[in-house]
Image (cartoon, rainbow, N blue to C red):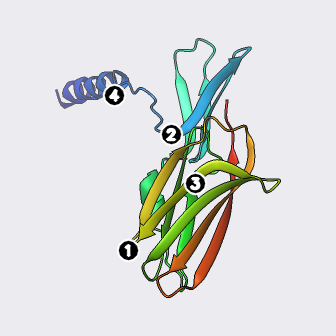
């Protein structure tokens, strides 16, 4: 009797375990999917990902191994550590449609943000604002720019008159 009960419970467990299904979902700031001759590639821009997917000959069973670590864009920028003269961070690199940047300084002042192409020519993106305190995060639409490398520069003029200039290289991969 115990053997029959154990067989029934084992069968019920196997059937219920087999009936589960998951839909693969990826949260990413940018990326894409392509398929050529039965081989597929899924990629994300700005997130750490190392995933390999295998299918059997029938296409019925799928095994995915690896990891994908989505990162919250704003959290990554808000976690910048403030140095003695201030901090400046850019995310994601490379960017496809939206670029985020954040900064924080030790004292109040004026902030000017400008973008330059690799030849040093000033692009049409600029931001000028009064800075009081805390970590500030901004974004801009970079989809109208050509793919390539650019320099994002933050010029901070403290209320004491001292100037600090910080620059970050950004890479745009636009469609």
Q: Residue at x 23, y 23 (%)?
A: 8
User: What residue sits right under mark 4 in the picture?
Assistant: 17
Labels 4 and 2: the sequence-earlier one:
4
Q: Residue at x 57, y 61 (%)?
A: 113
Mark 4 neighbour class, 10 Å CA radius: few under 14, some 14 to 19, many 20 or more: few
Find the distance from the CA under tag 4 to the CA under tag 3.
56 Å
Marker disc for residue 28: 2
Side of 79 relative to 58 (left or right): left
User: What residue sits right under mark 3 in the picture?
Assistant: 126
User: What residue sits right under mark 1 in the picture?
Assistant: 132
Labels 4 and 3: the sequence-earlier one:
4
Q: Nearer the viewer, mark 4 or mark 3?
A: 3
Give the secondary structure at mark 1: loop
Labels 2 and 3: the sequence-earlier one:
2
Mark 1 neighbour class, 10 Å CA radius: few under 14, some 14 to 19, many 20 or more: some
Give the secondary structure at mark 4: helix
Spot occupied by residue 1 in the image (x, y as percentages of width and height) = 16, 26
Side of 72 relative to 11 (left or right): right
Q: Nearer the viewer, mark 2 or mark 3?
A: 3
């Amino acid at each position: 009797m115990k053997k029959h009960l154990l067989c029934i419970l084992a069968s019920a467990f196997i059937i219920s375990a087999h009936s589960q299904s998951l839909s693969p979902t990826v949260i990413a700031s940018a990326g894409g999917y392509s398929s050529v001759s039965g081989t597929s590639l899924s990629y994300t821009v700005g997130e750490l990902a190392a995933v390999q997917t295998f299918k059997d000959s029938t296409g019925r069973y799928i095994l995915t191994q690896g990891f994908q670590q989505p990162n919250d864009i704003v959290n990554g920028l808000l976690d910048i550590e403030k140095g003695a003269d201030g901090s400046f961070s850019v995310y994601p690199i490379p960017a496809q449609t939206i670029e985020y940047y954040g900064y924080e300084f030790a004292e109040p002042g004026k902030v000017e943000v400008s973008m330059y192409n690799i030849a040093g020519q000033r692009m049409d993106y600029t931001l000028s604002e009064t800075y009081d305190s805390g970590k500030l995060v901004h974004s801009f639409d970079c989809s109208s720019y050509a793919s390539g490398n650019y320099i994002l520069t933050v010029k901070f003029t403290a209320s004491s008159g001292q100037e600090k200039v910080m620059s970050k290289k950004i890479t745009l991969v636009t469609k």
